[in-house]
Image (spheres, helix red, strand yellow):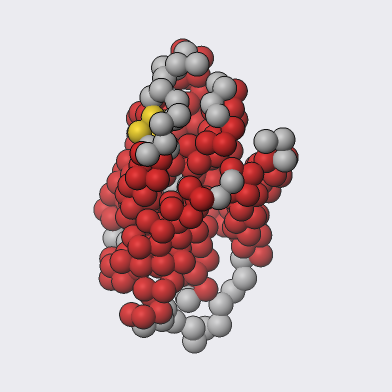
């Protein structure tokens, strides 16, 4: 086992980065829900320690979102779709929740963390399929409510290695925020989630002396670099597509994929 990557794995990670970057721009999801199961498979196949595999996959996924979210939100911002006042109200709670989530993840066994990931992915997929309409009178809560909502979003996103849109998009649309604005604002929120979560996972894994080569904390650097390059290139294309198509239909297809990935994560967790 080495910290480097073979050419075949580089191609696979570039493909993964391209797909997740496009989906990050299109759906505001950050790509983590697709990336974590794939990274878990890749790291397991390379003989990484079983007790760290899921945590490394989640940490690496969060780290890539630092780069993907910038490319995605820039494209959304150029179209005036990001609700910056909403993002500013949610951001403080998101940072605190993300930092806390990384510490909780460190304490959880990998099997429990994998099952938790699968549960939240299934929840997100269900929300995409239901597409429930909110009451016309419902609005976003006040400052205290937004701080609490941000804390929950950041905590869950940090635990499962996603950009938080699996919670923030349903939350905002439930409060009658238009879907394109919700996706764009969630893309903006992905950056503070990713930065805080990445820092948390670096701190959480820093004191572990048996981590594999090529890691900083729980982050696997070769995969981070490879995936980030591809995702930054494709994220703006996804953001442009989001404003030119009905993303609801694509969300239904993506929901079915998420159910499959959740099932795989549970099956893989049971084999640890």
Give how far across and how far down residue 10 sits, in percent. 45, 19
Give how far across and how far down residue 252 sits, in percent. 64, 53
Placement of 79 over or under 210, stated as above or below: below
Relative placement, left or right, of 114 versus 17 is: right
Residue shown at 36% from the left, 73% from the top: 147
Residue furthest top as drawn: 7
Residue shown at 33% from the left, 80% from the top: 143
Residue shown at 32% from the left, 64% from the top: 91
Relative placement, left or right, of 164 versus 268 is: left
Observer-nearest residue: 4 or 164?
Answer: 4
Figure quadrant of residue 189: bottom left
Residue shown at 32% from the left, 41% from the top: 67
- Quadrant in which the C terminus appears: top right
Observer-nearest residue: 160 or 206?
Answer: 206
Q: Does residue 21 appear anywhere in the picture?
A: no
Relative placement, left or right, of 161 versus 272 is: left
Q: Does residue 95 appear anywhere in the picture?
A: yes
Residue furthest bottom as drawn: 137
Give how far across and how far down residue 154 sits, in percent. 42, 60
Number of on-image labels: 0
Give how far across and how far down residue 109 sits, in percent. 59, 46
Placement of 38 over or under 137, stated as above or below: above
């Amino acid at each position: 086992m080495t910290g480097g990557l073979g050419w075949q794995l580089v191609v696979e990670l570039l493909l993964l980065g391209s797909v997740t970057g496009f989906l990050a721009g299109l759906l505001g999801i950050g790509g983590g829900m697709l990336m974590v199961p794939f990274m878990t498979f890749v790291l397991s196949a390379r003989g990484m320690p079983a007790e760290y595999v899921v945590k490394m996959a989640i940490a690496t996924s969060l780290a890539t979102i630092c780069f993907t979210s910038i490319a995605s939100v820039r494209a959304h911002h150029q179209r005036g779709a990001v609700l910056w006042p909403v993002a500013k109200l949610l951001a403080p709670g998101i940072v605190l929740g993300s930092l806390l989530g990384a510490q909780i993840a460190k304490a959880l066994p990998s099997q429990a963390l994998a099952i938790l990931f699968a549960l939240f992915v299934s929840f997100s997929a269900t929300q995409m399929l239901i597409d429930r309409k909110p009451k016309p009178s419902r609005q976003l809560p006040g400052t205290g409510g937004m701080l609490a909502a941000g804390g929950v979003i950041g905590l869950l996103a940090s635990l499962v290695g996603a950009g938080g849109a699996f919670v923030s998009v349903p939350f905002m649309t439930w409060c009658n925020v238009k879907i394109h604005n919700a996706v764009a604002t969630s893309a903006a929120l992905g950056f503070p989630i990713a930065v805080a979560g990445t820092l948390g996972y670096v701190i959480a894994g820093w004191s572990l002396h048996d981590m594999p080569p090529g890691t900083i904390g729980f982050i696997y650097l070769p995969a981070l670099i490879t995936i980030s390059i591809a995702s930054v290139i494709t994220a703006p294309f996804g953001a442009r597509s989001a404003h030119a198509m009905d993303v609801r239909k694509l969300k239904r297809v993506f929901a079915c994929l998420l159910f499959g990935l959740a099932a795989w994560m549970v099956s893989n967790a049971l084999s640890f």
